[in-house]
Amino acid sequence: MSFNVIDSTGNLFPARLVQKLADRNNIMVGAGYFSNPGLATLLYEGPKKTLDSKVYTRVLTFSVVRVSLGPMSTFGDVYRLIQFLLRFRDEEYVSTEAVEFIEENSF
């Protein structure tokens, strides 16, 4: 699953920061870029009947947090992830631990 994390004020957290904070809490998530040339074409150029080289020149790219669940994943794994993500809704957590982490590890 790919998603973004938003705090209580509606600000988007950088995926890389979420990954670092998750690592600090022994939770494994990935951070990377999601690109979708088809969606970019629809948003910026409208639907096309034929494909040409212009379709792939504009690519919609954004940073996301990624989580993989598989047969070995347990309810406990998902519960810990959700509890971790809920911390981003807490203004105190964001203003202390997350901000301090950003200052320590300037991106």
Image: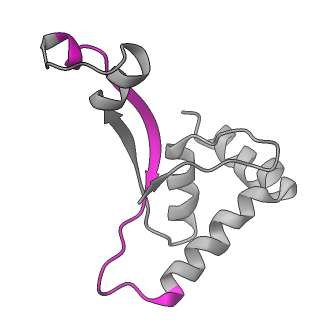
The colour scheme of the drawn protein is one colour
- For the point 57% across and 40% down, the residue is 14
- For the point 76% across and 41% down, the residue is 10
Q: What residue occupies the far front of the structure in this picture?
A: 49
39 relative position to 101: left or right: left
Q: Nearer the viewer, residue 77 or 16?
A: 77
Q: Against 67, is 81 above or below?
A: below
36 relative position to 17: left or right: left
Q: Against 79, is 68 above or below?
A: above
Magenta-highlighted residues: 54-76
Queried whether the magenta region covers residue 99, the answer comes back as no
Q: Position of residue 68 (x, y in %)?
A: 35, 67
- For the point 36% across and 39% down, the residue is 34
Q: What residue occupies the far right of the structure in this picture?
A: 92
Q: Position of residue 83 (x, y in %)?
A: 66, 74
Q: Quadrant of residue 72?
A: bottom left
How many marks do you count on the picture?
0
Queried whether the magenta region covers residue 74, the answer comes back as yes
Q: Position of residue 12 (x, y in %)?
A: 65, 40
Q: Nearer the viewer, residue 10 or 93?
A: 10
Q: Quadrant of the C terminus?
A: top right
Q: Position of residue 64 (x, y in %)?
A: 46, 45
